Image: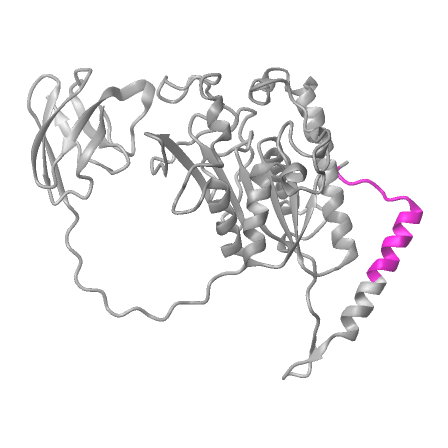
Amino acid sequence: MLSRLLPAARTAALSARVGICAALLAATAVSVGTGTASAAACPTVAIGVPGTFQGLAHAGRQDKNNPVVRFGSEVATVIATLRQKIEIKDHHIVYPADGAADLDAAGARLVYDWSKYKASKDAGYRAAYDAVKDHAATCATTNFVLVGYSQGAHIAGDLAQTVFDGKGPVDRSRISAVVLLADPAYNGPSPRTTEVIYTNGKLTQDQDHWKIGGGLGQRAHFAGSDPVFSVCVYGDPVCDGADLGGQDGKFKGVENKHLHAIYLGQRFENEADIATWAGVQATRLIQPAAPAPAPAPAPPTKPAESVTIAQAGPRSVTVTVTEAGGAGDRTVRCWNATDATHKWAENYLGETKVSIPRTGTFTVTCPTAPKPGTFSVEFLNWRWSPSIQWR
């Protein structure tokens, strides 16, 4: 049972608080042009759920008033970003935040139902559920933002889905935004999910949008109308742990555990880090920007840069580009497939490095000879070539 009955004394106290809140709102109601009344809304409440080994359960002698101690660094950053844009109250969730050392939150799926992690997560879920219920009872106009990192994202995501399924402590309309960082139940195809690739010391959005899954499986899809931003860095064994070998056979969970900490301290999309960027996206859901004035008619657009390929040898193709927006040093992957049909295990032929001119011709030699049939090349983080028939 997801909710717990409140003791009679607590129920009476909450009823009194609801009555006081209603009276204050009625007293401050103002007339509007139509003759109806409107009351000032209570501040939005940000429910922050720290990750494994974070939060007050692991604070020791640290300053318990410090937001980083109460929420963990990642969640504290999101909430601080929200506070710059909107009026909010915050509420930190206190729960065991337990899991075995290093990456057991991902490996726990092997014994999930009996794991220390699951007991901790369930306790956090109950605490977060009750926090939303209590704040909602205090004021009937309070809306909520749910924020979580790692195990905290697992909890916040589960609670969001309970509400969106109509079984939560508040109506779905009162969840203004949900921010999930490194969700162990990450579901890549859900709307507004963002996959991030870390290469050459930089973070970029990966447009391939692999259907990756969390180390503890994939949660059900969020709907397009659900205000959820969920972010995962490729190779992070917590949110990209469904296949610890990795889609391309290169990712190894233990080797990539540093990627679980990269949601801070590395610039992303012109923001200080991924956590800040996610907070900005959430504020745009809560406070949409005013419609921009209609733009002037755009000048005729140039045709997209031309890219053609032609078979040149047993393993090589000649590539011709014109005014290439992807000029420069770039990784190129060979495929017996197209963008829409490529699969690592079946038709990946390896990758190589090339220097792409803005206009001109160059050669790509594939590590593995293609098989007869469909063939194309992928210019990483730029575009795919048209396909040809390999003979």
**Nearer the observer, 115 or 104:** 104
Residue 47 in the image: above or below residue 320:
below
Residue 99: which quarter of the image? top right
Query: Residue 11: x percent and y percent?
Result: 88, 50
Residue 12 magenta-highlighted:
yes
Q: Where is residue 235 in the image (x, y as percent from the top left)?
A: 43, 25
Q: In screen coordinates, is 2 left or right of 379?
A: right
Q: Quadrant of the N terminus?
A: top right
Question: Could you tell me which residue is drawn at 8 percent across and 30 percent down?
Answer: 362
Using the rendered view, name the quadrant where residue 333 is placed. top left
Q: Name the residue rendered at 45%, 37% in the picture.
A: 189
Q: Which colour scheme is used?
A: one colour
Toward the viewer: 321 or 349? 321
Q: Which of 348 and 134 is in front in this view?
A: 134
Exactly how many numbered labels are in the figure? 0
Query: Does residue 294 appear in the picture of this structure?
Result: yes
Q: What residue is rendered at 72% in x and 42% in y?
A: 129
Q: What stretch is highlighted in magenta?
A: 2-18
Residue drawn where x is 75% and y is 48% of the image: 133
Magenta stretch encompasses residue 272: no
Question: Which secondary structure class fits the magenta region best?
Answer: helix
Residue 62 percent location from the top left of the image: 70, 33
> Where residue 145 sits in the image (x, y, percent)?
61, 49
When asked about the image quadrant of residue 203, the answer is: top left
Which quadrant is the C terminus positioned in? top left
